[in-house]
Image (tube, rainbow, N blue to C red):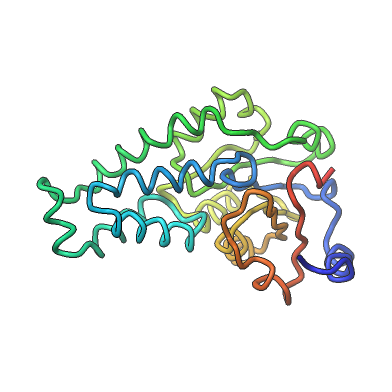
Amino acid sequence: MLSRKRVGDAMNKIETIDNYKTIVFDCDGVVLDSNKVKTQAFYNTALAFGKAAANRLVKHHIERGGISRYEKFRWFIENLEAEELAQYSSGPDLDRLLENYAKEVRKGLRSCEIAEGLEQLREQTSNSIWMIVSGGDQNELRELFAERCIAELFDGGIYGSPDTKESILNRERKRGNIVNKALFLGDSKYDYEAAKTSNLDFIFLYKWTEFSEYEHFFSEKPVRIYQDIQSLL
């Protein structure tokens, strides 16, 4: 982890969290402990093409945390080998893969842990616009957040794939939904890159991340690193 001095220097250059006018949250690994749920769902969905294919998709998924399932399954289909295709008589079908993945992941999302301190942080930042910008399916997210009674916390909206995070952030800024100064809370390299591209400050939360090399990646970057949402209070 970064030294206390490095974290302190970064904090001196960035606003305290209750001064941000907009706070953008990733979902998986930030608001919900759902990274492992989705990783297992990718594996189970791809297993029809063999263990090697399933493991290859899992590796691709973890290396590209935060990117939509649509892009990942397109990559998966394009990179199947002939012998793997032969194991699945009806052949790869993107819509069927996405449907099977959604079924796999649905149950886990309804039972996984919600981040502690979420409601307290909402009270602390009551003047901020809150929104979700996730690689997860947008309709699925909205249904899930309503079912788990946390949708009302995100007054700026709940957004996800098939749109990319960059396109969502740019669109919402044009709509006036993202107002500077704005902050992105994420747990992946892609979250950081999307925030940087869209000129948002960034805080990395590591408790549930699958980005194993985050310490090295952020070692020379002015990014604050915290364990979880609770530790922001």
Q: Quadrant of residue 98?
A: top left
Extreme residue toward the bottom, this view? 220
Q: Nearer the viewer, residue 114 or 9?
A: 114
Q: Nearer the viewer, residue 202 or 208?
A: 208
User: How far across and how far down the image is residue 201, in percent?
Assistant: 72, 60
Image quarter of the C terminus = top right
Image quarter of the N terminus = bottom right
User: How far across and how far down the image is residue 25, in percent?
Assistant: 64, 46
Q: Nearer the viewer, residue 5 or 126?
A: 5
Extreme residue toward the front, this view? 51
Q: Nearer the viewer, residue 177 or 52?
A: 52
Number of numbered discs on residues: 0
Q: Residue at x 51, y 57 (%)?
A: 65
User: How far across and how far down the image is residue 7, in percent?
Assistant: 84, 65
Q: Quadrant of residue 72?
A: bottom left
Q: Residue at x 46, y 56 (%)?
A: 67
Q: Residue at x 63, y 38 (%)?
A: 156
Q: Residue at x 64, y 65 (%)?
A: 214
User: How far across and how far down the image is residue 15, in percent?
Assistant: 84, 57
Residue 201 in the figure: left or right of residue 186: right
In the rendered image, the vertical position of residue 189 relative to residue 40, given as above or below = below
Q: Quadrant of residue 127?
A: top right
